[in-house]
Amino acid sequence: MHRRRFVAAGALSALVPHTHAAARPLRITYGIVWPCSTLITEIAASVLRRHLNVAVELLSAPGAPMWEAVAAGRADVLLCAWLPTTHAAYWQRYRHRVIDCATVASGTWLGLAVPDYVPIDSIDQLRDAHASLGDRIVGIDAGAGLMLRTREAIARYELRDLQLLTSSTVAMQAQLARAVERRRPIVVTAWKPLGIWARHPLKRLADPLGVFGTGDRIDALITPSLPQRAPRVVDFLRRYRLPLPEIEAMMLRLDDGVPLARVTSDWLRGHAAEIARWTQGDARPAMR
């Protein structure tokens, strides 16, 4: 088993408990403002509770505090580590006190996107198109790894006339929808999986400097004491996989206003075979 450790950082005051139990439950931290993180976490929590009889407490937090929680042992599991690119800064800071347990999903992408009627195809072209785009890039929450990468892109591509706006995933999608409806130019921070690709005719902007990398995987991180304390939980996490298209389909349902509990319960009802493999498999996949 390969362990990676890192130095703990400050207090995790941002964590917000969502469930409570008398005994010490398994604590999973996640980004409540990130639909992908919420879906992956809620499905895992449901399986752990119903099929492995594990008490689970969900703790919501921004980006860096999620990593800090696992590092310090205040949380046991993080299921939304985007590696090697998006969360590279967090990994470098905290890698010596977490275990990269397994990959939950692969084939992700992140970068900048525009509607297909906007006549630019590459990030470097934003330099001359800034006025038509309102001198802004519509972003998401400030703590997201994508925002860190976008700030780096602004510096490396010398996009000094463009301002990166901090908002949220929901607000970014709403601004994009309004712009597309009126056929107005807009550039947004974007990633896959996300429902905007099914809803709008978008194109990824080429990234010739490779600021955003070539794609990530979504990994499960655990605190180093977990394999000894809860080996059945770790066995489950090693097997836990969600295909990216299925995550994106669930995100679309959330965008349509279907409650999270309904979306996840519908998925669980339709995937009994996968759940059985996750919870009853004989072979133990190797830890990353």
Image: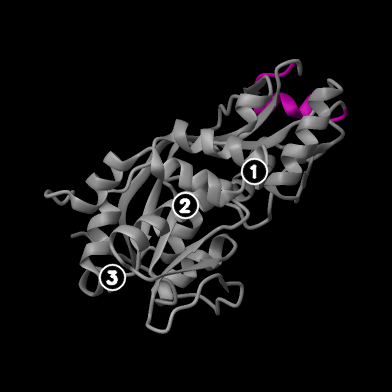
Spatial distance from mark 2 to mark 1, Cα to Cα?
13 Å
Spatial distance from mark 2 to mark 3, Cα to Cα?
23 Å
Q: Which stretch appears magenta?
A: 119-131
Q: Position of residue 286 (x, y in %)?
A: 18, 50
Q: Position of residue 76 (x, y in %)?
A: 38, 69
The residue positioned 61% from the left and 27% from the top of the image is: 197
Residue under pointer 1: 150
> Considering only vertical position in the picture, is 60 above or below 177?
below
Q: Position of residue 132 (x, y in %)?
A: 86, 26
The three-letter code of the residue at mark 1 reads Thr
Does residue 2 appear left or right of residue 12 in this picture? left
Residue under pointer 2: 88
The residue positioned 21% from the left and 73% from the top of the image is: 228
Can you tell which mark lies on residue 226? 3
> Who is closer to the viewer here, 136 or 235?
235
Are the residues at dot 2 and dot 3 in contact (C-beta closer than 8 Å)?
Answer: no
Farthest residue toward the left?
282
The three-letter code of the residue at mark 2 reads Ala
Q: Tell me where residue 204 sits by quadrant.
A: top right
The three-letter code of the residue at mark 3 reads Leu
Which quadrant of the figure contains the N terminus? bottom left
Farthest residue toward the bottom?
22
The residue positioned 61% from the left and 25% from the top of the image is: 198
Residue 128 included in the magenta stretch of the image = yes
